[in-house]
Amino acid sequence: MKTETVNIFSSGEGRETALDLAERTGAYCQLDNKSVLRLRLLSEELIELIRSFSADLQGDFWLETDDKNVEIHLKTVIPMDLQTRGELLAVSTSGENSAAKGIIGKIREMIALKTLPEDPNTKAMTEQALGLISAGYEMSSYVAGAYSWSMSTYISRIDKADFNIEEKKEAKDELEKSIVANLADDVKVSIVNSDVEVTIIKSFA
């Protein structure tokens, strides 16, 4: 079953409607209260993806179910403009890259990087800030301008990536603290030019 689509905005508009949809979907799938809460938490994390972009950025949120297997979808178009570039550079030049902490934060910055116009300086600075997750998507699929990344592949390749022991330890610690990494079975990211779709996959069976 595919639910109706809810429009959400980076300003926060539509957020509660989307979370209510997630809870109703959990009830439809006859999930217990703990599982419904987890579905809501995963939905909250996904909605956070667009919060750091301009206030009028819109995304489409919906869920798809097959028995107790649930996919949470967010689809949006990231504007390739100077405002987005400025927002990304402000993060990348901060030194600490605080806005990109956590798996969802780093996926957000990965999306921003891949949807910006080609610029060697921006690319180099952002990839340095993203660290292992940058290596993770570069090792993933790229075909004719279309990028794909998955959390499960990223996790399986951390030890094989060309980074030092401390960086790998930091990446693993971050995964251990991540709500998404602990609750979801996988996260898939698809980027085609400025079109972005992120899907969180969870089986409650």
Image: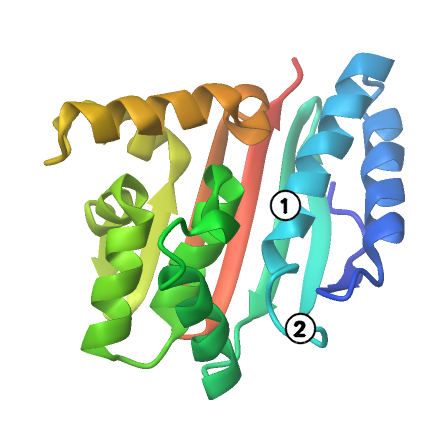
Q: Give the crowd class for mark 2: few <14, some 14-19, many >=20 residues within 10 Å.
A: some
Which quadrant: the N terminus? top right
Task: Indicate the amino acid at tag 1.
Answer: Leu
Whether residue 32 appears in this view of the structure is no
- Res. 46 mark: 1
For residue 100, above or below residue 144 = above
In the rendered image, residue 175, in percent from the top left (x then y), is placed at 43, 25
Camera sees residue 131: yes
- Mark 2–mark 1 CB contact (< 8 Å): no
* Camera-side residue of 17 and 93: 93
Q: Which residue is drawn at 37% across and 61% down?
A: 92
* Callout 2 amino acid: Leu
At a point 36% along the width and 64% down the height, the residue shown is: 93
Which part of the image, by quadrant, shows the C terminus?
top right
Q: What residue is at 48 percent from the left and 48 percent from the top?
A: 98
Distance from the alpha carbon under mark 2 to that under mark 1: 15 Å
Residue located 28% across and 22% down the image: 169
Residue 62: percent from the left, percent from the top? 72, 50
Which of marks 1 and 2 precedes in the sequence?
1
Q: Horizontally, is 38 left or right of 156 in the view?
A: right
Residue 200: percent from left, percent from top: 57, 38
User: In the current view of this chain or complex, which residue is farthest to the front?
Assistant: 95
Q: In which quarter of the image is residue 125?
A: bottom left
The kind of secondary structure element at disc 2 is loop
- Give the residue number, with chain letter if any, for mark 2: 57
Looking at the image, which is closer to me, 161 or 141? 161
Q: In screen coordinates, is 118 left or right of 199?
A: left
Mark 1 Cα-neighbour bin, 10 Å: few <14, some 14–19, many ≥20: many
